[in-house]
Amino acid sequence: MQARIPVTILTGFLGSGKTTLLNRILREQHGRRIAVIENEFGEAGIDNEILVQERDEQIVVMNNGCICCSVRGDLVRLLGELEHQRREGSLAFERVVIETTGLADPAPVAQTFFMNLDIARAFVLDGIVTLVDAKHASEQLDRNREAQEQVGFADRLFISKADLVEEAEVEALSRRLRQINPRAPQQRVHFGAAPVELVFDIGGFSIDAALEIDPGFLEDRAHRHDDEVGSFVFREHRAFDPQRLDLFMRLLTQQYGADLLRYKGVLNVQGKDRRVIFQGVHMVMGAQEGKPWLADETRTSTLVFIGRKLPRRVFEEGLRYCLTDC
């Protein structure tokens, strides 16, 4: 009988750096074959464009809902399909990484590996790794139960973006995280630079610890998100004017930054032969070059916005103003 396949759940609130960390892992020459299940909140997936696919990793995207509630059945199906392909020999991997959406409660995801007999026979939950954004964590923990749950269920905590705040703020955050979850080791990471041995083979997940955090952990229950939080997608074939887009996004974040939880996109920018990968959290944003546009493909910009009661019409009209005529 084959050994069970270890699974790592990678979680953290919106914009905490999960995909950056996962990209670092996929780039490293560690010799491990990894299957990735990528979950995104909303109707369009962007992170699959950001993830490197230089080798033969199996990357599956679930972007029709949150993995902890509406598409939890899809997770069971996908894990079953991966295990079947591995057993047949058509797919070679030795572990699975599940990157949850930033709005996910990790408890229902972890439940899958204990409450479904077929999944429990084939897979073992190795650990839950949670990223915490030092720049925005205080507000996120104050306002979002999911952020607290992600910290509470963590077997290991990575503090990202510590370079963006004063040392005293990072130390205060570290103390707060320790109060929420005293058993999880903490590590600062810069642009996802975490040793792979701190992510894999930690053997950290414990049913007893999970029941201490949530006595109803083994009860099958629905998870609902705050109705104020929603998402929408902007798509366009015309190229963006970079100066107009930069100005508009700065004005947008000044006006709506507090409620703009996460925004990211793959952009067609005038004068660029490569995709521009654009990401932001609240008022902090940045961009980098992605894969080249192929000669025969349609250059399409896709932007996803996640936030509290965002005025969609204002966003869309402003973005259209930033487009070129061709």
Image (spheres, helix red, strand yellow):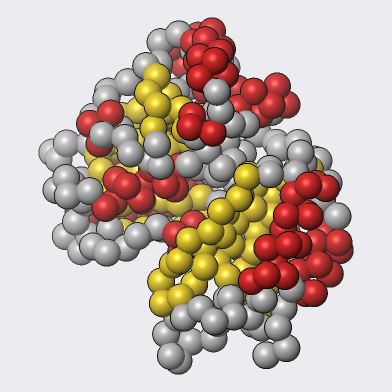
Given residues 93 and 180, the one toward you in this image is 180
Query: Residue 302 sits in which quadrant?
Result: bottom right
Query: Residue 326 sits in which quadrant?
Result: bottom right
| Figure check: 43 above or below 160 | below
Query: Residue 116 sits in which quadrant?
Result: top left
Q: Residue 8: where, in percent of width, then height?
A: 35, 36
| Quarter that holds the N terminus | top left
**In this orientation, does residue 16 appear?**
yes
What residue lies at 40% left-to-right and 10% top-to-bottom? 183
What residue lies at 59% left-to-right and 80% top-to-bottom? 270
Asked whether, in this view, residue 97 is left or right of residue 236, the answer is left
What residue lies at 50% left-to-right and 19% top-to-bottom? 167
Q: Residue 141: where, in percent of width, then height?
A: 65, 23
Q: Residue 244: where, in percent of width, then height?
A: 72, 70
Asked whether, in this view, residue 23 is left or right of residue 40, the answer is left
What residue lies at 26% left-to-right and 34% top-to-bottom? 195
Asked whether, in this view, residue 224 is left or right of residue 212, the answer is right
Count of numbered labels shown in the rendering: 0
**In this orientation, does residue 128 appear?**
no
Given residues 240 and 68, the one toward you in this image is 240
| Figure check: 248 above or below 103 | below
Given residues 239 and 125, the one toward you in this image is 239
